[in-house]
Image (cartoon, helix red, strand yellow):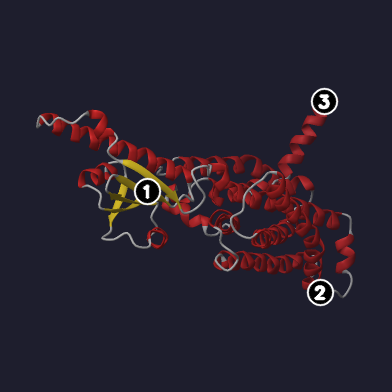
Amino acid sequence: MRIKALVSRIIKQNIRDKRTLALMMVAPLIIMSLIYFLFNSNNDSVLNIGAYNTTNEFNEQLESSNIEVIKYDNISSIKEKILNDNLNSFIYSSDSILDITYENSNPSNTQKIKSIVKGALAKEQTNNLKNIIASNQNISIESMKNKLSIDESYIYGDENLSYFDTISPILIGFFVFFFVFLISGISLLKERTSGTLDKLLATPIKRSEIVLGYLIGYGIFAVIQTIIVVLFAVYVLGIEISGSIISVLIVNIAIAFIALSLGTLLSTFANSEFQMMQFIPIAIVPQIFFSGLIPIENMATWLQYICHIVPLYYGASALQGIVIKGYDIVNVKFEFSILVLFAIVFSLLNIISLKRYRKI
């Protein structure tokens, strides 16, 4: 009977807690649906390759492998062509050398192009051999295979650049965001449940002053945590940064303040630490999905629009630019400005949300 009474109490308690019940039943469906659409989007992304002095047969072989070949009439300023025209690589043939320059910010695209180019060359050489045999020319197969050599170069990184190297800045930003969100939200929740916030609200202090005070107070620890995470990633894990580590710190601090303001905002709608944890599937999980770990260009068009309302999308983009491409904070000023805007909006919403506790 005692067990029955306990079970009955738990069931009634959870039924009364509509938010817990909704998140328990609905949140998994939302996350599963999101994962379904993410991984069932169009994975056949088209790669852009610039070409100069390559044969029509070679170009046709590339195009048959879902590559768009853009022909150029010169090879001046190859790096600018790649960056300005959004090319994944540039190929030109000179004498017995096939020169390939890879953009290489995405190593998986680079490896895909390498594989396709080798396949296209092999097919072209095979067809040439068939033509030679048909015309009874006395040229050995080995001499035809060795006729063309490949010279490869990279704009970002080198041939050793791995997939982890490209996602490491995303992971740094995500861990900063996640832990600052969690700690700040739970900390402010304790302030409320312990009665500290009620005592503050009983004084003439303004809501904006309360929010600013909490953001600065917890922000100091968020900045320290951010610096520790970044320095650990660079000097202990050995993650290489092409740009300035100061720029990395600045962007991550902006991410931390977004997490701080969002965490404090959502904590005003939670009555316990358990309820605060319930916001993770809604506020945190989509951040990692739309941060770039899954290539944005491979997603369905409507999912790509969602990316632009996710703060970590801009943070990850800025960090990848600094870490991989060697940008500084000026080069990522658009992404940084959006991060600052998110932090301001969430802070203003914090001020508004305090109206439920005191109207002043």
Drawn side of residue 151 relative to residue 278, left or right: left
Which kind of residue does numbered mark 2 sit on? Lys
Q: Position of residue 224 (x, y in %)?
A: 78, 57
In the image, residue 89 above or below residue 4? below
Give the SS element for disc 3.
helix
Q: Residue furthest top?
A: 1
Which of the two labelled residues, at mark 3 and mark 1, occupies the earlier sequence position?
A: 3
Give the SS element for disc 1.
strand
Q: CA distance from mark 1 to mark 2?
A: 62 Å
Q: Which mark is residue 3?
A: 3
Which of the two labelled residues, at mark 1 and mark 2, occupies the earlier sequence position?
A: 1
Q: CA distance from mark 3 to mark 2?
A: 50 Å
Crowding around mark 1 (Cα neighbors within 10 Å: few <14, some 14 to 19, many 20+) is many
Q: Position of residue 219 (x, y in %)?
A: 77, 62
Q: Which residue is mark 1?
A: 100
In the image, residue 106 above or below residue 136? below
Mark nearer the viewer, 1 or 2: 1
Mark nearer the viewer, 3 or 2: 2
Q: Is label 3 in contact with label 1 (beta carbons under 8 Å)?
A: no
**Residue, x 52% and y 55% (percent of image)?**
307
Q: Which residue is mark 2?
A: 206
Q: CA distance from mark 3 to mark 1?
A: 72 Å
